[in-house]
Image: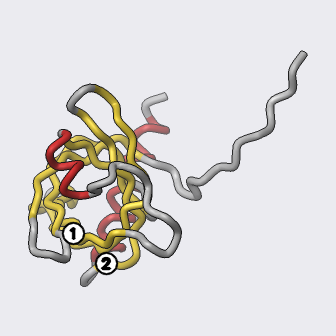
């Protein structure tokens, strides 16, 4: 029997599945609307079409360490009974993969938040994880 080496876990935080729009702002002034696929306290996975993927990552491959493309993400999360809370997160694109002919996923690692963004995201993720554990 062939042994398989254990794969290193690159995710330190639990991810929650979400479906929401996010605006990705590039340093060169380009804004793109993409879809959030999942979120964690340390990053997000977005889905986009081929045209958007080419604008975000022209080579469509993960950037070399230290040469990451920086972006700003703007998205909203529910805040209990109140209106949704807007989150502005800064990050670097660290991962890209093709899912289908015209669908790509891009991983973004957060590097910082504006205002109470991290606290709002942390609260939202905690609520989703609690709902998941309570429904099983």
Contact between labelled residues 1 and 2, with CB atoms less than 8 Å apart: yes
* Colouring scheme, one of rainbow, by chain, secondary structure, one colour: secondary structure
Q: Judge whether 135 appears above or below 60 on screen.
A: above
Seen from the viewer's position, the closer of residues 22 and 31 is 31
Residue pointed to by mark 1: 87
Q: Percent position (x, y) of residue 126?
A: 42, 56
Q: Position of residue 73 (x, y in %)?
A: 22, 66
Q: Residue furthest top?
A: 1
Closest to the observer, 59 or 43 = 59
Point out which mark residue 128 bears.
none
Rounded to the nearest angstrom, the CA distance separating label 2 from label 1 is 8 Å
- Name the residue nearer the viewer: 68 or 14: 68
> Which of the two discs, 2 and 1, labels the residue nearer the N terminus?
1
Q: Quadrant of the N terminus?
A: top right
**Residue 56: percent from the left, percent from the top?**
23, 58
Q: Residue furthest front?
A: 59
Residue drawn at 18 percent across, 70 percent down: 26
Residue 127 in view (yes/no): no
Element assignment for label 1: strand
Could you say which quadrant of the image residue 69 lies in?
A: bottom left
Q: Nearer the viewer, residue 134 or 16?
A: 16
Q: Quadrant of residue 90?
A: bottom left
The residue drawn where x is 17% and y is 56% is 22
Q: Residue drawn at (44%, 72%), measured in percent from left and top? A: 67
Residue linked to disc 2: 113
């Amino acid at each position: 029997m062939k042994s398989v080496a254990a794969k290193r876990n690159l995710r330190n935080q639990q991810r929650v599945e979400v479906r929401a729009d996010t605006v990705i702002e590039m340093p060169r002034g380009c804004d793109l609307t993409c879809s959030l696929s999942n979120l964690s306290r340390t990053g997000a996975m977005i889905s986009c079409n081929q045209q958007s993927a080419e604008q975000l990552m022209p080579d469509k491959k993960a950037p070399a360490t230290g040469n990451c493309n920086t972006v700003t993400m703007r998205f909203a999360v529910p805040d209990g009974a109140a209106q949704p809370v807007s989150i502005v997160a800064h990050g670097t694109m660290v991962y890209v993969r093709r899912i289908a002919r015209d669908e790509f996923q891009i991983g973004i690692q957060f590097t910082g938040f504006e205002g109470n963004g991290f606290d709002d995201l942390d609260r939202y993720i905690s609520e989703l994880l609690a709902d998941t554990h309570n429904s099983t």
